[in-house]
């Protein structure tokens, strides 16, 4: 015990110093600047529509009347390693601050070390519940820089896969949300249905998650034989099951008590906080990039943008449930309208020569080797591409310097931004609402921390 | 659309790019906000330390750090990208917190990973890295593989 670096339960101060995040943590009121204090209590708007209102903040409240507690980073309902610091007055939450970074692995820095060919394997691991959409966003940015056209079939395959991915992501949300609220049957059902989609992914891309399927120039492989039947079975089964979820959850009194009217948000607040996706749509703003700024072939398919009214937990639940049904509609149209042709660009700059050519042509072999060791060179420039991920606007900002690796890769993760609305949503809520608020924000910590 | 004195150029993919000076930056964003750009989608910074043959429109003096702000107008369905040269040794631009409260975390991220300072930011602390981390990892002179892995209580450069 003479060694001062030995950690034991008796050395509370040492343990505290080890886990402390210092100034990142929720501070006492007397140590907090007024703007930050307003943010932590969830004040966002003034009458003119934007700035913080310091007058709504109770500066005189004494710190010894309240209690600051930690929730997380390892808490079953924080969906990963999210740590919330809450200031409580009895059961009620006065201030909230999310503390993140526990899953930070420097993926943006890693992206600068990987070639454009390898880059998709990196970004696909950010939002691990919607890998296809991550790859899509990254590939679209690279294709804009390269100025290459993607064949029709690749566009529609991408659309099919991203909608299936959206369904699977929302199913996991339904599952975990159900478990957070004690509806543990929903946990089993959600993951059971998701399994069908993962099996389809495995058949198509070879992997269940982190597919590296969408790549700059197209997709990695064509759809397998009989994919239409598999996709139709998925559509029919999951559509029927969504009505079972309705029966199970929508009218259930315990579920409704914890969702309806809890943690509301107005459209102005959502816009000011840059919140996107189901959170923004729940406030009544019909903003869906698939409809508003169409990419791929979303302007050729029919679907509805689901919006809510009150911006509360229940609206966010209803939007996600109905988005599953809309995605099924899009998948069905993809099955009917899937064009023939190439599944990847035939531009030799980005696409390796066919396997058969490598055996007979030295040049093809060299070309193949160059493409996968050095990678292709991308013209200098900078580009921002955005797609609608299940959580909101997923953006990818790439600065290229003419070499085979991105000079700077920045990903605008929707979870990262949406998570900052937690202070607002917790305003006036009780401790138990924290669980539902985190759940309906649907943060994926891999994307928050990157 | 942009006030006089601000350099404007068409970026790739028909995104409008503005290149204000540091002094013009806040006023420009404010004018965009009043001009129906309801949302600030993204704020990030780039370190152009060893970028070869950097191109910028005429009249813009290149500095090492650049802050890139993406604004979105939902009513016009339009995006605009504002690229401001933030400085070399002590990069600093105005914080957009009072215009768009949602930029708070994005600016903290840019500060944490690249060391760009944001004037009048309410809580400019690290957000992704541990509190006692040294250096800003996304800077180009922060060597990959040249720094011992930093763990708490591990012997290292700290």
Image (cartoon, rainbow, N blue to C red):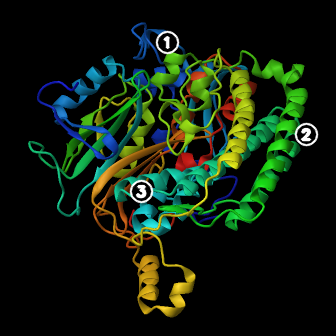
- Using the rendered view, name the quadrant where residue B50 is placed: bottom left
- Using the rendered view, name the quadrant where residue B96 is placed: top left
Pointers 3 and 2 in contact (CB under 8 A)?
no
Pointers 3 and 1 in contact (CB under 8 A)?
no
* Real-space Cα separation, disc 1 to disc 2, in angstroms: 46 Å
Which of the pair A346/B38 is nearer the observer? Answer: A346
Quarter of the image where the N terminus of chain A is located? bottom right
**Residue A182, image x, y percentages:** 86, 34
Tell me which residue sits at (20%, 43%) in the image: B85
- Disc 1 versus disc 2: nearer the observer: 2
Q: Which mark is residue A337?
A: none
User: Would residue A203 appear left or right of A81 to someone viewing this image?
Assistant: right
Q: Which mark is residue A143?
A: 3
**Residue A215, image x, y percentages:** 52, 62
User: Would residue A161 appear left or right of A364 to someone viewing this image?
Assistant: right
Outermost residue, top side: A47
Tell me which residue sits at (48%, 48%) in the image: B128
Give SS at disc 2: helix
Residue denoted by label 2: A185
The chain to which mark 2 is attached is A
**Crowd rating for badge 1 (residues with CA inside 10 Å; few <14, some 14–19, many 20+):** few
Give SS at disc 3: helix
Q: Which mark is residue A60?
A: 1
* Real-space Cα separation, disc 3 to disc 1, in angstroms: 55 Å
**Crowd rating for badge 2 (residues with CA inside 10 Å; few <14, some 14–19, many 20+):** few
The chain to which mark 3 is attached is A
């Amino acid at each position: 015990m003479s060694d001062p670096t030995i950690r034991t339960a008796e050395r509370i101060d040492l343990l505290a110093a080890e886990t402390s995040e210092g100034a990142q943590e929720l501070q006492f009121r007397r140590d907090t600047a007024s703007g930050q204090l307003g943010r932590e209590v969830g004040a966002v708007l003034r009458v003119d529509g934007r700035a913080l209102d310091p007058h709504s903040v109770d500066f005189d409240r004494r710190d010894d009347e309240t209690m600051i507690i930690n929730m997380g980073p390892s808490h079953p309902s924080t969906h990963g390693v999210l740590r919330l610091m809450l200031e409580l007055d009895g059961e009620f939450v006065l201030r909230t601050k999310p503390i993140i970074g526990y899953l930070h692995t420097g993926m943006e820095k890693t992206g600068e070390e990987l070639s454009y060919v390898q880059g998709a394997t990196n970004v696909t691991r950010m939002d691990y519940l919607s890998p296809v959409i991550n790859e899509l966003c990254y590939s679209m940015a690279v294709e804009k820089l390269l100025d290459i056209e993607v064949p029709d079939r690749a566009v529609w395959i991408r659309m099919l896969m991203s909608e299936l991915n959206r369904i699977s992501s929302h199913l996991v949300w339904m599952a975990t949300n159900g478990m957070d609220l004690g509806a543990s049957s929903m946990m089993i059902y959600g993951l059971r249905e998701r399994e069908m989609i993962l099996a389809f992914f495995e058949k198509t891309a070879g992997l269940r998650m982190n597919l590296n399927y969408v790549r700059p120039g197209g997709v990695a492989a064509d759809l397998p034989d009989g994919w239409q039947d598999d996709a139709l079975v998925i559509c029919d089964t999951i559509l029927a099951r969504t009505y079972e979820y309705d029966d199970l959850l929508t009218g259930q009194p315990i579920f409704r008590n914890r969702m309806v009217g809890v943690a509301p948000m107005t459209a102005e607040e959502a816009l000011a906080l840059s919140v996107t996706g189901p959170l923004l749509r729940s406030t009544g703003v019909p903003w869906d990039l698939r409809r508003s700024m169409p990419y791929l072939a979303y302007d050729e398919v029919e679907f509805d943008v689901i919006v809510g009214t009150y911006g509360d937990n229940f609206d966010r639940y209803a939007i996600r449930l109905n988005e599953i049904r809309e995605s099924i509609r899009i998948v069905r149209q993809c099955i009917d309208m899937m064009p023939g042709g190439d599944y990847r660009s035939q531009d030799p700059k980005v696409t390796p020569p066919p396997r058969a050519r490598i055996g007979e042509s030295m040049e093809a072999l060299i070309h193949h080797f160059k493409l996968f060791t050095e990678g292709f060179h991308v013209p200098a420039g900078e580009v921002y591409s955005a797609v609608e991920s299940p959580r909101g606007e997923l953006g990818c900002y790439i600065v290229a310097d003419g070499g085979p690796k991105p000079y700077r890769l920045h990903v605008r993760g929707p979870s990262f931004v949406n998570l900052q609305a937690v202070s607002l949503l917790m305003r006036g809520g009780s401790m138990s609402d924290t669980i539902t608020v985190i759940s309906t924000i649907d943060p994926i910590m891999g994307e928050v921390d990157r | 659309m942009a006030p006089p004195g601000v350099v404007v150029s068409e970026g790739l993919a028909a995104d409008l790019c503005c290149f204000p000076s540091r002094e013009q930056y806040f006023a420009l964003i404010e004018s965009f906000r009043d001009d129906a750009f309801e949302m600030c989608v993204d704020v990030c910074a780039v370190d152009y330390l060893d970028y070869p043959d950097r191109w910028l429109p005429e009249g813009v003096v290149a500095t090492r750090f650049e802050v890139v702000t993406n604004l979105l107008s939902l009513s016009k369905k339009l995006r605009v990208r504002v690229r401001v040269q933030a400085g070399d040794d002590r990069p600093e631009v105005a914080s957009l917190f009072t215009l768009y409260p949602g930029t708070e975390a994005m600016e903290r991220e840019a500060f944490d990973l690249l060391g760009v300072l944001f004037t009048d930011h309410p809580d400019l602390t690290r957000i992704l890295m541990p509190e006692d981390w040294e250096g800003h990892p996304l800077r180009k002179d922060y060597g990959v593989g040249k720094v011992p892995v930093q763990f708490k209580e591990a012997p290292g450069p700290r």
